[in-house]
Amino acid sequence: MTLTTEKEEVKAILDNLCELYQADLKKVNGSGAYRERNRNEQSRPSFLPLAKKIFDDIPASKVPALYLALFECVPDYVATHNLQTQVENENGRKAVFSVEELLLNVIIPYQLPHSVKAQCSHSSEACSSNKKSSKGAHYVQVPARVRLEIEHSVRLMRHFLPIKLPPETKIWRQIRYILVPSNNKEKLRMLGPEVSEAFMNGTISFAALTFAMKDDVLSQFISEPSAILHALYLGPLGAPTVEGFASGRSAEFRKQCRAVLSEVEMAMKSPEEFSDRKSSSIRDGNLELCSFHNFRQNAQILLRDLRGESKVDAIIPMGWACAALKKFARKTYVEKTWKEENLYELIWTIMCQRPNLKKY
């Protein structure tokens, strides 16, 4: 098979993936149930079924190389699709998605262990202890079909680091896991130079940078206290991230971190100071680059929290609230390991702080 033929096959797979995603997105956002639940936001389809449609027919040994080839194909693909891929739902709203983010979203669930339905006899111990189905089916966890060697993980890390994700995302925990499932520190350190390079050349995303700053292994590869200021120019940096980044370091490093926070205060003073103190590695065209107004607001919150001056009561995070409702409803009505009164108390607590979840 020629190199040209291989590239055409990879491009066809990428095209198929994008088409399937667009079809799923139309279906989800066009459903009546979704419109009733939330008229203002875009929903997203489940990515594991999508990933299985793409990768299940490919020999497991060839999938890691395909992951990399798909990422390498993206620039040419995007260039022929007006830089961004869009889909229009029944309401006429257009959802824009990054092809790199789409690849990330199908690779992660495919590399995570997942549950599959398995039939068992009514007499088996597994069925008697697992009541997920009234028809005698139970769920078992299976490992990922594909194994990533460390050389694949390093190259995937290079592709993942620039992908811009929502600031509140928890997906980097999953990325860390799928790249080094064993949590072997030596293997994790092999990912570190990619983090260092992406930070130095300014391609690292806010989500990746803040995750690395908190990670006990990856943070060792961000040796510049200026990462604090860099991150603030990209998004709402939290006090726990700064504290985690500085902890366990030398007294000199912590002193330099305090000096960076003084720079933050200077950058807050005026748009001119804000512009002058921006790292040269952060390009003006960076889509995550904050406006002066947003930077100032984020910096005020960070400095206030670092000083312990926050007067705002902690509000239950939206993501945690949704996950908790699902988890404990399942424990109450499916697994039957939780009492109803405990679930009602949880719902009441969440509704007090998040009344917009009433229809959830």
Image (tube, rainbow, N blue to C red):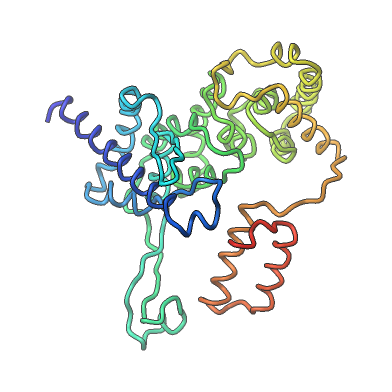
Residue 6: x percent and y percent?
Answer: 19, 31
Q: Is residue 185 left or right of residue 312?
A: left
Q: From what the image shows, is residue 340 above or below residue 239?
A: below
Q: From what the image shows, is residue 290 above or below residue 30?
A: above
- Residue sitting at x 52%, y 31%: 192
Q: Is residue 110 left or right of residue 342?
A: left
The residue sitting at the front extreme is: 91
- Residue sitting at x 72%, y 67%: 348
Q: From what the image shows, is residue 189 above or below residue 253?
A: below
Q: How many marks?
A: 0
Residue 162: x percent and y percent?
Answer: 49, 29
The residue sitting at the left extreme is: 1
Quick one: quadrant of the C terminus? bottom right
Q: Between residues 275 and 259, which one lies in front from this camera angle?
A: 275
Q: Is residue 302 left or right of residue 67?
A: right
- Residue sitting at x 35%, y 44%: 21
- Residue sitting at x 57%, y 65%: 327
Residue 116: x percent and y percent?
Answer: 36, 65
The residue sitting at the bottom extreme is: 123
Quick one: quadrant of the N terminus? top left
Residue 20: x percent and y percent?
Answer: 31, 45
Place residue 307 in its image quadrant. top right
Q: Between residues 155 and 11, which one lies in front from this camera angle?
A: 11
